[in-house]
Image (tube, rainbow, N blue to C red):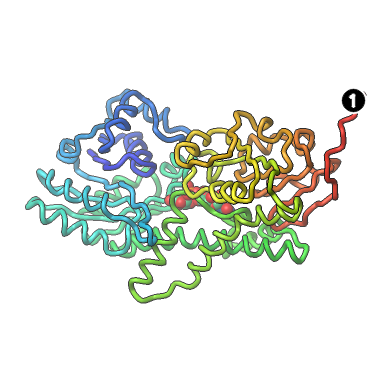
Amino acid sequence: MKLAVIGTGYVGLVSGVCFSDLGNEVVCVDKMSNKIEMLNRGEVPIYEPGLKELIKKNKDVGRLHFTTDLLGAVQQADIVFIAVGTPSLPDGQADLSYIEQAAEEIGKSLNGFKIIVTKSTVPVGTNEKIQEKIAMQSLFPFEIASVPEFLREGTAVQDTLLPDRIIIGTSSEMARKRLIELHKPLTDNIVVTDVRSAEMIKYASNAFLATKISFINEIANICEKVGADVDQVAFGMGQDKRIGSSFLKAGIGYGGSCFPKDTQALIQIAGQMDYDFKLLKSVVEVNRDQRFNVIKKLESILNHLQGKTIAVWGLAFKPETDDVRDAPAIEIISSLLERGAKVKAYDPIATDNFTRHFNMDGVEYCDKAHEAASDADALCILTEWKEFKDISPAIIESWLKRPNLIDGRNIYSEAELAGTELNYYSVGRPAMNKGVKERSPILLP
Ligand code: UDX
């Protein structure tokens, strides 16, 4: 099939590339000419395992194209995907201006029958507005559908090629048939719904996953008080198929481009309908508070943070991505600076992105994990990069000035800490405070 994908962010780019890999002719469109030039040179604007290779493979065989020419892309296509961003407005509502602009331009470009599919996460009813907008611009027939995207950053290619399910929301029999045909090679689990339900499925899914995370984080906070171990609790809970074991990893809360934005947007959508979504409001509040537990733990060990050197490992909101949007590191580092601490930060790949987006005076960005940790009064692990897990606690202890380790992602086990003098604080597990204020001098043989 011939496809046009409008928007080359995470969703648009990965979807377009994967559709071309299935044998479709795909033209990806973006207004940002520098992004398109990069992609045409074979460079990828986001860090996503496997994506670069797939782009090269499908560009080389001439099935994948990148352009700023929306009109040309739409005119050659049978199916047009809208995958532009829907960022948050200051009040949490989804900003639909990019969607509206794309719909208008698609309408102006129509030259015959097309199926127009929205992949962006949009409030319920938006596809009907898109339909009206396009119809105002064109007399050519078209059908609309909502096919929300559930890919995760870091595993986006795999999630797109091997999805748990595909949701196709449309009232058009013809659109349904064509979209089933297009997605059939990906999975047999295709769920057909009406448009509004498809729009809601995306928000409800993300809100539910965010709820699981905030739930287990609250259980973790209680575990700390009663002396239980949240990892064991989550494992035990997860054995019940009705609960499931995923998204029960306690930590310092969720970040990223979707959960914070979509939970806020769903609260707003409910509010506009005079419904107070109390549960989801609490999920958001719990998530906001959870990251500050790192600061509380630091203060409980060091009394105050004024003049202390705090090492931070992990700026990305999760491993295998350089994305720092709504990363817990932002607020944690700001709070450390506010309290007069000196911060030394390290991330395997997200430092450039972090410094480009946030101006945090007083942070020393380091090129190596070891540089950040050396001579620090405490180390905080904020992202569970494999690189960190591969460094043993005994080595970390030897780098620090004071043996204080706050593990915000529970990456170390009790066995790995045995034999160290580290004062180790993780999330929802008993603290191991050895009461050691300064690291013992290393005795040379
Ligand atoms: C999420 C959804 O998973 C995806 O379906 C949707 O399309 C976009 O939003 P993503 O933001 O890429 O994907 O990351 P995800 O792996 O879901 O993690 C989100 C956040 O939750 C991260 O900050 C992660 O650290 C946190 N998380 C996840 C936990 O704290 N505990 C968990 O058990 C799982």
Q: Quadrant of residue 366?
A: top right
Taking the spot 38% from the left edge, 66% from the top edge, the residue there is: 268
Task: Say which quarter of the image contains residue 125.
Answer: bottom left
Say which quarter of the image contains residue 419: top right
Viewer-proximal residue among 131 and 162: 131
Viewer-nearest residue: 339 or 238: 339
**Foreground: 189 or 69?**
69
Q: Which residue is mark 1?
A: 444
Q: Could you tell me if residue 164 is visible in this image?
A: no
Q: Left or right: where does residue 288 sit relative to residue 297? A: left
Please tell me how many numbered marks the rendered image carries.
1
Quarter the C terminus occupies: top right
Q: Residue at x 43, y 47 (%)?
A: 151
- Three-letter code, disc 1: Leu
Q: Nearer the viewer, residue 344 or 36?
A: 344
In the rendered image, the vertical position of residue 405 relative to residue 27, given as above or below:
below
Q: Residue furthest right?
A: 445
Q: Is residue 234 above or below residue 33?
A: below
